[in-house]
Image (tube, helix red, strand yellow):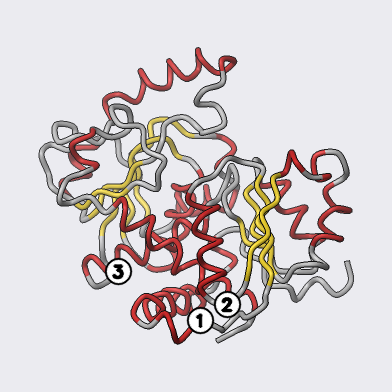
Amino acid sequence: MAGLSSVKHVLRLRDLELEDVLFVLETASRMKGTPDAFADKAARRCLLLLLQKTSTRTALSFQAAIHGVGGFAVVLNWQDSNFSISPLEYEIRYASLDCDLVVARLRTHADLEGLAEHSSSPVINGCDDRYHPSQVLADLLTIQETIGAISGTTVCYVGVRNNVASGLIEAAHLLQFRLLLVTPVKNPAATDAGLDQLVETSAWVEERESLASAAAEADFVYTDTWVDMEEYADPAFENVRSQRIERMKPFQVSPENLGFAAPWIMHPMPIHPGFEISADLIESSKSLIYAQSANRRYTQQALILWCLGIS
């Protein structure tokens, strides 16, 4: 559509240049230290939070983020709106006229791309089946705060190769840190040709088979749910869920499976203790899980300012 090509959407991390990511991280750090300095940066700006997927952290952190810079949020559940009964392109063309920014948490990346194509306001991906850029930005800030740098560190991602893994693959290539992938199961929806090429050709991404050997080299070990939240309690997915859990048991993040290495532990939440991670590591002194989630607010505030063109 005419006039929409200049809108700054963030559907995946690769929509940002390196300097943009560094701006978000630096701004987020300043916001944590001096929040009052940013209290009116986005005064009276409206953020539409469009939720098709269930949410705790995305819903809460984006509302806190926009309030923290002087704006306000309108939460719209997909099933409670006409998005569920009318073509997406017509609904978003209207909705984007009444808001300054859209954060959409949708089931499919294809729908998110359609949303962005017809939106006159910037669209941020709040999570879909392929990417989760707002999560990986919080992860990067957490890594930076923990050891003082991102470039040159080693992160091991273990579990199902999903939307979070996709973001880490993009981040490793962009910020030049080493990413070791221990992913015996791959979610077909969570990849595209560009991601596959990064895995195959990037000097920063390696595929591994052994969790213990990868953990021995890693500064951080990162895991995520083995079963997508929409399918976790769905009876129709019960057989596949059981097979997935059985296949992934040897890759649980536990002291034994890590070979008793002691890296920093990361997880984007929600957590399923006893499945992808043992309960003792969730609350261990090396756990960064709650720090990651808390950092969502600040990196999202910075990302909001970037999308709105506010420095």
The label shown at residue 203 is: none
Q: Is residue 279 above or below residue 149?
A: above
The residue that appears at 40% across and 44% down in the rendered structure is: 269
Choose mark 3 or mark 2, whichever is in front.
Answer: 2
Q: Quadrant of residue 252?
A: top left
Question: Looking at the rendering, in which quadrant would you find the C terminus?
Answer: bottom right
Q: Are marks 1 and 2 in contact (CB under 8 Å)?
A: yes
Q: Secondary structure at mark 1?
A: loop
Q: CA distance from mark 3 to mark 1?
A: 24 Å
Left or right of 218, for residue 259: left
| x and y percentages locating residue 297 in the rendered image | 45, 64
Residue drawn at 83 percent across, 68 percent down:
97
* SS assignment at label 2: loop
- Residue 39 — which label? 1
- Which residue does the numbered mark 3 point to in the structure image? 144
Mark 1 and mark 2: Cα distance apart in space: 5 Å
- What x and y, as percent, mark residue 14? 55, 63
Q: Amino acid at mark 1?
A: Ala
Q: Where does label 2 land, which residue?
A: 70
Toward which corner of the image does residue 46 lie, by quadrant?
A: bottom right
Q: Are marks 3 and 1 in contact (CB under 8 Å)?
A: no
Of labels 3 and 1, earlier in sequence is 1
